[in-house]
Image (cartoon, rainbow, N blue to C red):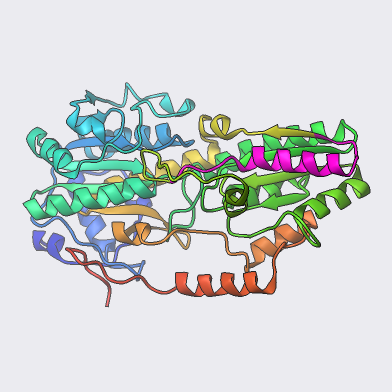
Amino acid sequence: LTRTHYKTTQHIQLSSNILSMKMTPYHKRLLFKRIAAGGFTSVVLDPVRGVNFESDEVKACIVSCGGLCPGLNTVIRELVCGLAHMYNVNNIFGIQNGYKGFYSSNYVAITPKTVNDIHKRGGTVLGTSRGGHDTKKIVDNIQDRGINQVYIIGGDGTQKGAYEIYKEIRKRGLKVAVAGVPKTIDNDIAIIDKSFGFDSAVEEAQRAINSAHVEACSAENGIGLVKLMGRYSGFIAMYATLASRDVDCCLIPESPFYMDGEGGLLQYVERRLKENKHMVIVVAEGAGQDIIAKSIPASDQLDASGNKLLLDIGLWLTHKIKDHFKSKKMEMTIKYIDPTYMIRAIPSNAADNVYCTLLAHSAIHGAMAGYSFTVGMVNGRHAYIPFYRVTSTRNKVKITDRMWARLLSSTNQPSFLRQKDIDEAREADRLTNKPPLPPVANQNVAK
């Protein structure tokens, strides 16, 4: 095994158990090379040409971007402690307030001592922001400061930005490794099994659902309405509903529904109240946007991340249900709960803490070996994935799969689907499962 081994393109599978053993960085790199040819067969990574990182020459930086998510501080802590304890790296910097911190000179030196207990807190100690991505300015700053390892924690838009940074670095021929740790509370990043923070979010969502259930049970014809995160994907709403077992109706972006007429949502709510005298509705924030747009002019405004600003489906449903029962002259009480920012701000639970640790260590081992990638668990195994693979599509709930069928069985709600909707969903699944087109620049694709 020689240094030229770094220049070869390989199929990568991580073996964290071996790489976390107490040994010198030199022997860790040898072990990494020995196991690098096995495992994940659908992607091929490109190493940074000529890189052979030694501990004393590594100058690493860490940045967190986008919205808050449980586990951000844990990832930051484990990146710092892993670099320091496993590879004896001393030059580690935090970039404050997202991408714009690169060219705002918001650098702060961080050590294992300064991040020792940050995993017990929610949010991110480095700060975060949306937008602010200027590729050339960012790479200029990386080059000027002599940074050679960049760890980027963020969601879909952040990983797209990481890919642009990687391409600019390759264009300039810099010996810099870029490692992405995908973060999204919605669990909508493609390829990977699950994003960190998702388990914590589902667990915290239970508190809101339990509160809604108590309120609904304590009033005549009581309705508890809970709005959860899920701009494009309804995973939190679906899993929280399945875990709760107190929910009578779950609405997500992937499953169309209609309000009026035979088989509509209002008819179902009315029937459920006559049967049980109370009910709980869980709705994802991105559900029903096409229905709201018919009665409220939709805004074309975008947030700093480029996402379209959504109308409040929870508030809209509250008014629609109230108006319906008022026209029927039926007594009812509805309580609307939006726990979004409470869920985002909590510390991660035990399961997410372990997962964040594994992701951080995976990112470190790959970067020390000279690779640029996004790290994630794929089919139960930690893998390194090219940036374009996790940003080319979005992970969504498949309403033709068993998990959604289990939810319908648990809630006993109708599907609110016509045959046309089912056929369209199946066609969308078929198109989604097609392999993506190969990238155009500097990324290799497995043959």
Location of the C terminus by quadrant is: bottom left
Look at the image and tell me whether residue 386 can be seen: no
Report the magenta residues as a range.
Answer: 308-333
What x and y, as percent, mark residue 134?
20, 41
Residue 153 visible from this viewpoint:
yes
Give the camera-side residue of 160 and 203. 160
Q: Is residue 339 found inside the magenta-colored segment of the image?
A: no
Residue appearing at x 25%, y 30% in the figure: 95
Q: Is residue 217 left or right of residue 352?
A: right
The image quadrant of residue 421 is bottom right
* Picture mark count: 0
Residue 301: x percent and y percent?
42, 42
> How far across and down, in percent of the image, does residue 184 sit?
45, 45
Q: Nearer the viewer, residue 333 or 175?
A: 333
Residue at (10, 55) in percent of width and height: 171
Q: Quadrant of the N terminus?
A: bottom left
Left or right, 42 with reference to 231: left
Quadrant for residue 50, please give it.
Answer: bottom left
Asked if residue 314 lies in the magenta stretch, the reply is yes
Front-most of residues 397 and 243: 397
Judge left or right: residue 12 versus residue 273: left
Q: Quadrant of residue 189?
A: bottom left
Task: Check the image and report above or below for 42 versus 54.
Answer: below
